[in-house]
Every structure is written in C-alpha cells, then in structure tokens.
Image: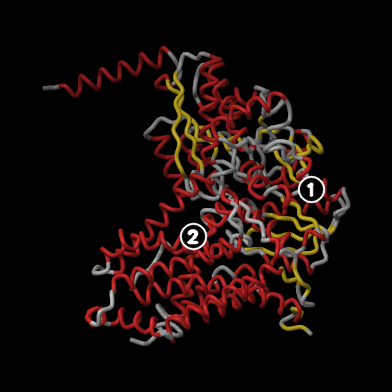
Amino acid sequence: MEIFGISSQALLGQLFLGLINGSFYAVLSLGLAIIFGLLNIINFSHGALYMMGAFVSWIGLTQFGMSYWASLVLTPLIVGVLGIVIERLLLRHLYKLDHLYSLLLTFGLALIAEGVFRNLYGISGETYEVPELLQGGIDLGFMYLPLYRGWVVVAALSVCAVTWYTIEKTSLGATLRAATEKPELVQALGINVPVLVTATYGVGVALAAFAGVLAAPVVQVNPLMGSNLIIVVFAVVVIGGMGSILGSIVTGLGLGIVEGLTKVVYPEASAVIIFVIMVVVLLLRPAGLFGKQA
Amino acid sequence: MKLKPIIQALGLALATVGAAQAQISDNVVKIGVLTDLSGVYSDVAGKGTVVATEMAIADFLAKEKPAFKVEMVSADHQNKGDIAANKAREWFERDQVDVASELVTTSVALAVMKIAKEKNRIALISGAASTLVTNKECNDVTVQWTYDTYAVANGTAKAVVKQGGKKWFFLTADYAFGHSLEKDAGDVVKANGGEVVGSVRHPFPGSDFSSYLLKAQASGAQIIGLANAGGDTINAIKQAAEFGITQKQQLAGLLMFITDIHSLGLKATQNMYLTEGFYWDLNEETRAWSKRFFEKTKRMPTMIQAGQYSSVMHYLKAVKSINTDDTAKVMTQMKKTPINDFFAKNGSIRVDGRMVHDMYLLQVKKPAESKTPWDYYHVRATIPAAEAFQPLSASTCPLVKK
C-alpha cells in the first residue's frame, strides 16, 4: 500500500522515529512549562542544563565508573541541585522584575556553561556507548527498532506521566499551584512558599538533565547539543500554551510526529515546519493549543 | 602653537626614510588568523590554527633571522561571512595587516578573498573546502592551501568504487558546501562506472539522522556517502551503527578529519575510507612537527592546522627572499617557489590559486590495530598532486588561459 507515493511501511517507520524525537521534546518542554507555569521564568538555560545532564552522565561513566542506570537517577539529582543553587543565588532576586530580566540572566548562564564545556572538551564531543542491556534491536517488520530508542519512549513517557499526575492530581501539586496563584495566602496557611518555588525550579532542571542522560547514547555529547534543540523546544512550549503541563507533553509528542512526516515528504522543510505551525497557532489561538485564553 | 603641521611633516619625513630603508611597510609583517574559535569548526581549525601560526612565526624568526618584525593577530569569525568581512576590512584598513589567513567555512573565505582583492592584500585559505574558491570566484591574491571538496571526494569515492561499492546514496547537508561535495563525489562515482541511486538533503546543522538513514537503507545502495561535515557526520555515523545499517551497507565520509575519528572512537568508524591532505604519522618529519603541536594543544593536528603552518611559513619565506611585502611581488614569488616542508613535497601554487600537493587515501584502523593514542589510520595510497585536484583544464577560473 502506498500513501503519497510512500510505502506504508516507510511511513510507519518514520512515524515511530517522530515519536522518539517527540519524547525528547516532551520531557524538555515539560520542564520549561513547569518552570514558566509555576515561577513565571522563561528558562533559557534549559538547553545548557540538558547538555550538562549528558556531560555529567559521560563524566560519571568515564571518570567514576557510574553506570547508565545509576546515572539516570544521580545525574538529574546532581544537576537539579545546581539548579537550586542558581535559583537561590541569582534568580530569586529577579522575581519582582519583568520576565525579560530572568530571560537574559538564564540566557547568559547558558552561554557561560557552553563556553566552559567547549573549552574543556572541544566541539566534536564525546561518545557515550549504549548500555549493554539495551544494545541491539528488534525487527518490527516495518523497521528495525534499536532497543535503546524504544526505551527512550517508555522512560520519557513514564516520567511525563508521573510529573503530570503529581502536579495535577496530588495535594502537593495543589499546594504548588495555589502558591503560584496567591503566594501570600498560602504563606499565611503556614506553607514555606520560597522553598516550594526553589524545589520546583530544581525539578524543572532535573527534567532537563534527565533528557540529557537519555540523549547521551543517541547523539554525540557535545557542548552545543542543547542550543541546537532549545529553540525547537521553546516553539513546542509556545504552541502547547505557555505553562500548560499537559499541553507541553501532548504538543511535544505531536510535533515530533509532524516533523517525522515532513522528513518523509520534504526533508528540506523539516527544520522549519515546527515554526510554521507556531506562526499559524499564534495567529489563531494566541494562548497556544492548551493555554487558557486571557 | 603650530605643533600639528610640524608633527605631520615629521611623520611624513620619517615615513619616507622608513620606505627608503626597507620595502616592508612599517618594517612589520602582520598576519591575521581569522578562524572559528567557538563554533562547529573550532576543533578542526580554531585555536589549533592560531597555535600553528605562532609556531610558524617562531620557527621563521629563529631560523631565518629576518630584518623585519612579524606579528600575529587573531579573531573569531563565528562562521559568518559578514562578521569576517568586517574584521578583514578593519585589519587591512586600520591595522596594516598583510595577510588574512585560515578562513574556515566557505562563505567566510569567499567574503574575505573579495576584500583582500579590493584592498590589495593576500588571503591564505587553509580551512575552507569549496572549489568555488579556485573556480568561478578565484582571484590573484588568494591561495587555497590544504584541500578542497574535489580532492577529498575524488580520493574516497574512487577508492570505494574500485573496491566494488558501485551503488551510492548521498546524505547531504542542505547548503552550498554539501551540494558541492555531493556533486563532486557523484561525478567521480559515475566516471568510475558506479551509479547514484538517490540522495536526501538534511537541514544544517542536524542532530537526528535516523529518518534519512532509514531512507538510505531502503534505497538498496551499497554505499551511503556522507556529504556533510563535523557534528552532522559524527551523529550520522553514530546513528547508522545504532540502526544496524553498517551491517549491510557501508558508509563513506566524504569530508572527515582526525578529530572526528578521535571523537567517535575506532569502534564506530573502523574500516571507513577517507581522504586527507595530512596525517601526523606519515614519516619522521610529520611526527616531529606533530609532536611539538601536541605538546602545546594536547591534540594531534588536523590537516587544516598543519596546512596553516605550511602556508604562513611559505608566505614569510617569500617576503624575506624578495625583501618586500608588496602583494603582487609576494604572490609571484610564492607561485614561483616550490613548497617543500613536512606538510607538502614539491607542492606548487597554480594560477587559479590552488596549492597542489599529494593527498592521502586513508582507512580507519580496527580498535585492536591501534597501538598508541591517535594511531588511527592505515595509509592505503598516496594520491599524487597531479591527480588529486581538479585539473586546470576543467577550471572555470577566469585567470586560467585556455
């Protein structure tokens, strides 16, 4: 069977690849959405933190013998703590100011981080081997699926689901959302709002680092890996609706698939398709697909 | 006080005296290194080319003991033609820079060589790859030193076709350089009895190549030619292994550097063919120079970095031998003198600005065959200068008389 002159087998394969890329978009945009939704910060250092996740994972493996599985847990913790330090030392001074200030600060931090890693490790990057347990692949009939890529989808979707559930369905999540709407009131009820805010930033950052660990065996670990991706992820967040948790997950996956299809039909356009969609969405629904209209 | 006219007159007098004593402006030869210090080409060129230039100047001063001074300035062009053009203009107009060198990235090279022509200074290109430099866009103040897309594609594609890899599919970076590489390699494949069954053009830079690789897999080609460079090539190779493509099909990297191999490791790159203009482990001379370079940078040199040293040294020797930094005279002298150093044997600069020298067909070693760090290549063939580059008869450079 053929669709648009492309065999349905090839199409199915490309859809699946799109889903894999979409998983990365989903985890990254989820982190951004949490940080924006709850802290009102446009975190431009997200790409650099993703890159640092991959590097910490690689350094852990090569210098300290930290296995991939340990890294999956430890790296987000390590980078998350770094995020907490950034929030405590720098970001908290900017909450009362315009968005632009935190955007510039986080952008500056990203440039510094990329510069430092470039200086230390060069631009060609380092290779992170696929963990032994996930080497090889299975023949799905329509495509050869490397086991590791399958794992990426499972891991990313699980983390997205847990995060969404925590924020939308638990009492902790409810407190968090209340604290961002009416901080004074929540504070008056005896809840330490600044700690809550700091922890939230830490979690957002940890998600970026988690995506970095997931990506390390798939792409070359290099200092610019984040800045190549972050612009697309920002577009995902804008399309999904700034700050919408579910929106960022669904949009991330959806746009991954759209991008995958574009690569089949007209590869040259695959780098711009997401931005074309962004323009259309902004014209029709300025608050994004899942955002609340103001 | 009428000090100003006096100072002016004094300055004029001094300048005249200076000119009479030596024909080297200000008695200083100034070399500008305009390179990518922060972006995708900062490993293959970058800081290493600045180090190579410093080495060339130090060696020249120590050995030749010239009467003039040699200075170096360097700047990051960020792979942007407009930034490079502004910097080059500033260097030529304000800072009395005699040579703009290195110039990795084709757009940068094309922009700077135009300004060099306009300002009557010299452009020494070590990093830029496109054959446009010595064809349609050529001029008489530019030399392209190390390699070009024709030379690297020619060497690798010919070798692979001869080994029986006749059906090709290209994975091409969607910009001028990628197109040029695909065309040059495709022509060689066809000329040697092979066929090109398809190609796919990917946005630059990319990070996920799985879609394109799947297309290449479905094409039934024996060889997947990578008409891209740097991080794109690295990720494509890594992901080809992941998707089990390299079990049935073979990859051919059309423009690869030793730093790419270093970054990917031998496991992912073993048995690949590639063509370079230099390898550190060719002979005693190359090893000795590369060892000195390694001590300064902790990396073995790429061909761009080695070529940079060679070009700067050749320029400085030319200036000394005719005792002037006059552009036309130096260019004539440089073209007249054969190049014999650790980088090139009997190299020469053609009228179109192409420095022709031997190229090397290399094959990446298996992990078990590599004895020491950076021991990465088998040298499979030396491609003689006369065959390595596009023949003058095929050139579209207006300077070539036909």
The number of discs equals 2
Q: What amino acid does circle 2 point to?
A: Ser
Residue A14 lies in quadrant: bottom right
Residue B310 lies in quadrant: top right
Q: Is residue B230 above or below residue A78?
A: above
Q: Kindly identify the residue that appears in the image at 48 percent across and 44 percent down.
A: A119
Q: Quadrant of the C terminus of chain A?
A: bottom left
Mark 2 crowd level (few <14, some 14–19, many ≥20, 10 Å Cα): some
Q: Which mark is residue B224?
A: none
Q: Tell me where residue B69 appears, x and y as whole percent.
A: 44, 19
Q: Is residue B76 above or below residue A160?
A: above
Q: Is residue B81 visible?
A: no
Quickly name the residue at label 1. Answer: B271
Quickly name the residue at label 2. Answer: A227
Q: Is residue B363 visible?
A: yes
Q: Quadrant of the N terminus of chain A?
A: bottom right
Q: What chain does badge 2 belong to? A: A
Asked which secondary structure carries label 1, the reply is loop
Q: What chain does badge 1 belong to? A: B
Q: Tell me where residue B214 appears, x and y as whole percent.
A: 73, 68
Q: Tell me where residue B223 appears, x and y as whole percent.
A: 80, 57
Q: What amino acid does circle 1 point to?
A: Asn
Q: Is residue A64 above or below residue A162?
A: above
- Label 2 and label 1: CA atoms lie apart by 33 Å
Mark 1 crowd level (few <14, some 14–19, many ≥20, 10 Å Cα): some
